[in-house]
Image: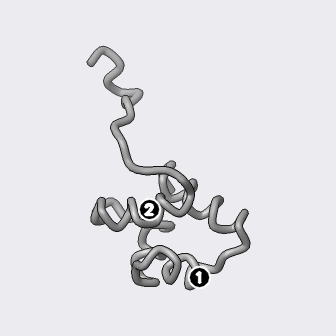
Amino acid sequence: MNNLSEFVKKRRKNLGLTQEDLSFKAGVGLRFVRDLEQGKESLRMDKVNQVLTLFGHQLGPVQSEKNEES
């Protein structure tokens, strides 16, 4: 799993939401939530942001550990 999928799953569980609850509140499909929590590598950024907005977050650039000089 990656950081994003772990973050979403942890936040969802902390709020006592099922995947179905989260998909409804975020306005995305249940399959999308499942794919997100399973760490699927190719997801629509707008939909990821719809989910993250519920937690007061959004996607943004994060410096990778592999390329610290850039």
Element under disc 1? helix
Residue under the image location 30 percent in, 59 percent down:
45
Helix, strand or loop under label 2: loop
Q: Is residue 3 above or below residue 40?
A: above
Q: Quadrant of the C terminus?
A: top left
Q: Position of residue 48 (x, y in %)?
A: 38, 62
Residue 63 figure quarter:
top left
Q: Mark 2 against mark 1, which lies toward the viewer?
A: 1
Left or right of residue 27: residue 45: left
In the image: residue 68, left or right of residue 52: left
Q: Residue at x 59, y 82 (%)?
A: 21
- What's the residue at 42%, 72% (across, down)? 35
Extreme residue in the top direction = 69
Q: Label 2 crowding class (10 Å Cα cut-off): few <14, some 14-19, many 20+?
A: some
Question: Where is residue 9, by image quadrant?
Answer: bottom right
Q: Which mark is residue 53?
A: none
Q: Inspect the image, locate mark 1, and give the three-letter code of the amino acid beneath it.
A: Asp
Residue highlighted by disc 2: 39
Image height of 22 relative to 6, above or below: below
Query: Is 27 above or below relative to 51?
Result: below
Q: Which residue is mark 1?
A: 21
Q: Is residue 26 left or right of residue 7?
A: left
For badge 2, the amino acid type reads: Gly
Estimate the x, y position of residue 6 in percent, counting from the top left. Answer: 57, 56
**Cα distance between the residues tagged 2 and 1:** 19 Å
Q: Could you tell me residue 51's position as x and y percent?
A: 46, 65
Q: Residues within 10 Å of mark 1 (few under 14, many from 20)?
A: few
Spot occupied by residue 3 in the image (x, y as percentages of width and height): 51, 48
* Mark nearer the N terminus (2 vs 1): 1
